[in-house]
Image (cartoon, rainbow, N blue to C red):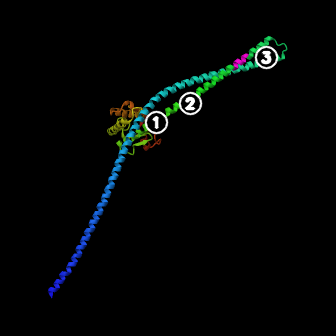
Amino acid sequence: MNSLAHRRRSLDIWPGFVDALSSLILVMVFVLLIFAIGQFVLSQTIAGKNRALADLNAQIAQLAQTLSLAQDAKAKLDVKVNELSASLGVSNSALDAKNVEAAKLNADIAALAALKTQLEQQVASLGAELDTSKKNLVVATDLNAKSAAQVELLNRQIAAVREQLSKLSAALDLANANVKDKDRKIADLGAQLNLALANKVNQLEKYRSEFFGKLRAALGDRADIRIVGDRFVVPTDVLFESGSADLSPAALVQMKKLAETLNQVAAEIPSNLDWIVRIDGHTDKRPIHTAQFASNWELSTARAVAIVKYLVVQGIPANRLSANGFGQFQPLDPADTPQAYAKNRRIEIQLTNR
């Protein structure tokens, strides 16, 4: 009986094993299905990436073509600027010649106007004489041949004077027309000159902004170094000792960075732009009188010259530099405080047209 029970238990295990094996197979089929779906999604994603990469390559090729066209346009623009500079010199000469010619025409017009006035006075005088003669002829009953000849002579003189006046009026109108035409041409030349100068100023403005940006990066982001309008303002306290025009060792490092930055920007400025770097020295209002410097004018000028000399040694062309001293006469802050004095003691650096 125990043997029969043991066989029954053995037969009961087999269906459970079959169910577990079926479940395992189903799980494996599900995993394989998930793997196949993942492979399909991954292949679609890779295909999309390949298409996006192809589109990016096409855009890069198009941008390269656009860059090439822009470089060609820039070269043509440089040629046009050179031609405009040459024509600007010719226009200035022509403008001077037109001004001289206009002055001569104005003098001729004034002379013609004076002559016209004189002839009008003569006509009026002759007319009065004619009226008097006619009255005398009417009153007189013994009109003779001599009086008649005199009247005829006066009539011919009046006619000749009137004809001359007519010619003078025509000449005067022609001269006025010529003057208006010259004035219009002079105005056109002036407009062209102003436009050319504005173009050159705009071209230099780009390099000034680049110069100030590179200079600020080179000198560091200091709160006491500022850009005021078109000028780069550096306090003299970081460059010179009090009452001295000798650059300090720390200042030499800053000036070397200034020279390197200026050399970089100068290499990019076109040769047809006539530019210059101004170094302007300023002091506070407190007077100075030493054996070396008689006044703040001498001190501010000596400091500007010291910076210019150092820049020349660093390779900046001397004809591109200008040193100026203004003493205490252009303060940024007119107050009588230590803060105002420190603000007014400064070196201004300006990239500008000559």
**Residue sitting at 34 percent across and 50 percent down?**
54
Residue 34 shown in magenta? no
How many angstroms separate mark 3 from mark 2 (CA)?
51 Å
**Residue sitting at 47 percent across and 36 percent down?**
198
- Nearer to me, 155 or 125: 155
Helix, strand or loop under label 2: helix
Q: Quadrant of the N terminus?
A: bottom left
Q: Which residue is mark 3?
A: 133
Query: Which residue range is magenta in the image?
Result: 156-162
Q: In the image as oriented, which residue stretches furthest toward the bottom?
A: 1
Q: In this picture, is 165 found above or below 55?
A: above
Residue 161 shown in magenta? yes
Q: Which residue is mark 1?
A: 199
Question: Can you give x and y, in whole percent of width and height, for residue 182 in the image?
Answer: 56, 27
How many angstroms separate mark 1 from mark 2 (CA)?
23 Å
Amino acid type at image mark 3: Ser
Q: How many residues crowd around disc 3 within 10 Å: few (fewer than 14), some, or many (20 or more)?
A: some
